[in-house]
Amino acid sequence: MKRVFFGALLLASLGLGATHVEASTLQPAGLVDLTAAAESSVNSVVYIKVTTAGKTQTVTTYDPFEDFFGDFFGFGGRGNGRGQQRQVQTPKRQSAGSGVIISKDGYIVTNNHVVKDADEITVKLNDNREFNGRIIGLDETTDLALIKVDAKDLPAITIGNSDDLKLGQWVLAVGNPFNLTSTVTAGIVSAKARTLGANDIESFIQTDAAINAGNSGGALVNEKGELVGINAMLYSQTGSYSGYGFAIPTAIMNKVVADLKEFGVVQRALLGVSGTDVTNYIDSEKEKGNEVDLGTVTGVYVNSVSDESAASEAGLQKGDVVTMVDGKNVTKMAELQEIMSKHRPGDKVGIKYIRNKKTHTSNVTLRNSQGSTTVMTEVDIDDFGVNLTPLTAKEKADYGVNYGLMISNIKKGKLQSAGMSKGMVILVVNDQKMNSAEDWENVVKNANKSSDRTLWIRAVTSSGRKASFVVELDEKK
């Protein structure tokens, strides 16, 4: 589990009392008053308890004496596949985290790593009311999740603009560390657009407000009590707070939430470049003994450009330096990622880049991971138009298989369109053996989040013939 944590020290703002300083430049002495922000935000942060049910797994065991004597007498051992399969029941697990109420009708934002394995979600409010939660959507790339409870008139937090945060600005971290509910800690914004290499898309708000286990998914709020980030990670060598915490900006959160509500999956617009901060590139070249003069010391150095991508359309090449996208300055990769995370496929943006110390501009249409400008929707299990049932012992014997899911009923849907019919047994989907309906649901869920959004199915017909099918998860035109 990723860690998200907070802890705080409230410092005094000291007045400047130097001789000959104008009175208007003096700062008032005393503590920064964050009580109103704390009181307004603490009721919007919830305690999330996650239960992961025990699951039955099939494992293969081997008799060590059989292996030894089999090899000794030439009968073979594991190499002949003589292991025995048995069912193992994993124990039930419970974990906890935090979440933030963002609408009165029960939508709650938390971290993906808090709820992704949940079989049951219990949401407890600050007034001790409890509700069952359900997952609306997950996004592993940004480590955000949207869940919902059936309730009305909940104390939704006011969402602020994380782009307006400034270094040194006071913020509060609100959450439930170590199962200590409704904990508030304070600190300042230490950095913006920070990357740690934990997620594919990162532009963290760094703060010295103390965060610890259980704060994951909680709120980072400004002095007004407005939500400016979702606490997500702790930088620590001990597993507990030791300096800095990191939050996902609301500028990214708003787009993810909107996409999960509308499509069930995040619409990710890609520029189509891989690169690094210019400063990192210059440092790496200097270590090799090379002198570098790109005409700038900030921006994103382009290492490569994907074929048929927006960047390719813009004319970008290896060695270029991207300095502006969509009218916003880009000084490092995290800033570029944050800008892109706010867009959907099909959006048009302007790009400014430097090549051979000369500035160029271009306008492009952003695309998704498949090179298309259309948005993608999550495919529901019902869209496949089939009922799948695990094989009985007799059916396994009849089909000559040890596992599989029988198509017991089929109607118009994706599998029928792909050529599948009643009586077929689905054996493997995307290299995953099908033993239960849960296996099927998991592989569809993973395919929804993958870049190619395709199901590769191996099956056997009622006549015993092996067959393969490809099911494309449609895009919304």
Image: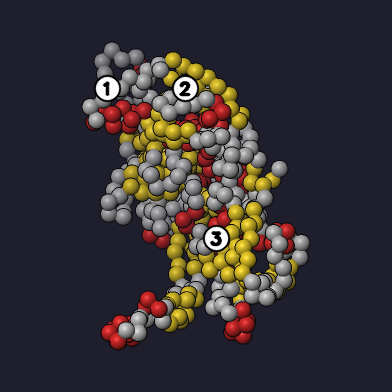
- Which residue is painted at 27% across and 51% down in the image? 237
Q: Quadrant of the C terminus?
A: top right
- Which residue is painted at 37% across and 76% down in the image? 79
Mark pair 3, 2: CA separation: 40 Å
In the drawing, does residue 171 fall left or right of residue 399? left
Q: Is residue 360 visible?
A: yes
Q: What element does badge 3 sit on? A: loop
| Residue for badge 2 | 353
Number of the label disc, if any, that sits on residue 419: none
Mark found first going from the N terminus, 1 or 2: 1
Mark pair 1, 2: CA separation: 21 Å
Mark pair 1, 3: CA separation: 48 Å
Q: What element does badge 2 sit on? A: strand
Q: Which of labels 1 and 2 is toward the front? A: 1
| Residue for badge 3 | 430
Instruction: Specify the amino acid type for callout 3.
Output: Asn
Q: Quadrant of the N terminus?
A: bottom left
Q: Is residue 155 visible?
A: no
Q: What element does badge 1 sit on? A: loop
Mark found first going from the N terminus, 3 or 2: 2
- How far across and down, in percent of the image, does residue 195 sit? 39, 40
| Residue for badge 1 | 291
Q: Which of labels 3 and 2 is toward the front? A: 3
- How far across and down, in percent of the image, does residue 47 sit? 49, 58
